[in-house]
Amino acid sequence: MKKIRRSLAVFIAAFVMITGADLLTGKTVPVQAEDNVTAFVDRMYQVCLGRTADEEGRADWVNRLQTGEARGADVAYGFVFSTEFRNMNLCNSCYVDAMYQAFFGRTADEAGKADWMNRLAEGQTRGAVMTGFVNSEEFSALCASYGIESGSGDWSGISIPILGNCSWCGADNDTITDFVTRLYRICLEREPDEAGLADWSAQLANGAEGSQVAYGFIFSTEYKQKHTSNTEFATMLYHTMMDREPDDAGLTDWVDKLNYTNTREYVFNGFLFSTEFARRCAASGINIGNAVETPDATDAWQMNVQILALCNEQRQNNGLEKLMTREDLWEQVAQVRAGEIVNYFSHTRPNGSSCFSLYDEAGLDYRAAGENIAAGYYGASAVVDGWMNSTGHRANILSESYDYLATGYATGGAYGTNYCQNFLGDW
């Protein structure tokens, strides 16, 4: 970093000599616009990349600025998000120093640097920080001194993946590999395999977002096969996304949602935009990304929630504990069975096996299981009334042997609407 600053100091001194007064005549020596533009480009090479400009690169940037194809902001983006600059893996401190030197032409003031460092620590992207510098009056004045229009832009949604230690100061950065390794260790509870670690890290290096990668682990077949309880799932999210133990109130709220109203994707989205996860992503130069699609608004999930609530009313009226729902029971058993009974209305599956074989195929561990099916009813209230007026179905709904209930829903077939309730008693 010191070497780069020395180069900048020498370059600025040379520029002042070129544009200063002629000592023999006392007159100001005019500088052609091309010289100004070239000086601006050369300065960006020195400050951002720590080297002199290559002829081809200089000619390209000078041409773009002179023809109006690019403005100062475009040049800023081109350098800061170049592969060469990104590969420096600057730590937050050195990155902010680079912004001050590149766009303000000065060292950072203590208060200003502290503010930018705090923003990065709170999860702001490096693109957002650069946006603040490039759209400033100081950068506009710097550009004007070279006869260049500064322009403006917004790069808040872009970050710079950290691949190694800082090349300026040697700081030990949180890299994208560290980000992926945490997911293996906390979510999957194992060390990363070499191929998997390389693949996920490469995806992040090529622009994959934190939400995509975290989703890939948390909703992977490997994790789903753990069949974690709703409490275990929410606790894992606290550890993985927030890097802390759950607080009692927060954990209770999320588990209640999972038990009675919402899917795991919905809860995942709730953690995704937490301050803690934003910090985790920012530390590795990763964009948080967008919310993932959830099944919550689908007719099938809404039917599951409505029927659960109605069945729990019946249970409470009979002095029984409420049942909870589980997304794995709903997705891997109830929804599959609802689809099967569309054209084969029976507790025997189309392949001739028992309906309970699906519990085993899904890998669910249980001490008790039950199933209710129905077809031709329109709406949750109608089908629950039908079941409650049938001795065998009523017995399942009011059984003390079960802890969980998931209801699958599918349309089609001879009756139009098809429902399958699957009950599970935990050990």
Image (cartoon, rainbow, N blue to C red):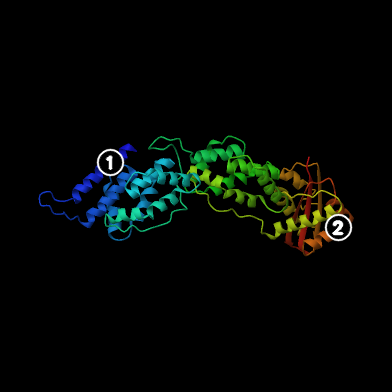
* Front one among 3 and 410: 3
Q: Quadrant of residue 97?
A: top left
Q: Position of residue 277 (x, y in %)?
A: 55, 45
Circle 1 residues within 10 Å: few <14, some 14–19, many ≥20: some
Q: Is residue 361 visible?
A: yes
For label 1, the residue is 7
Residue drawn at (43%, 42%), measured in percent from left and top?
Answer: 92
Q: Position of residue 86 (x, y in %)?
A: 40, 44
Q: Quadrant of the N terminus?
A: top left
* Front one among 176 and 337: 176
Residue drawn at (70%, 60%), measured in percent from left and top?
Answer: 299
Q: Is residue 142 left or right of residue 338?
A: left
Mark positioned earlier in the residue sequence (1 or 2): 1
Q: Report the Cα–Cα distance between label 1 and label 2.
A: 83 Å
Q: Position of residue 26 (x, y in %)?
A: 12, 52
Q: Secondary structure at mark 2?
A: helix
Residue drawn at (73%, 45%), measured in percent from left and top?
Answer: 361
Circle 2 residues within 10 Å: few <14, some 14–19, many ≥20: some
Front disc: 1 or 2? 1
Q: Position of residue 240 (x, y in %)?
A: 59, 41
Q: Is residue 107 above or below residue 409?
A: above
The circle on residue 388 is: 2
Return the residue found at the far right: 391
* Front one among 2 and 366: 2
Q: Is residue 151 left or right of residue 210?
A: left
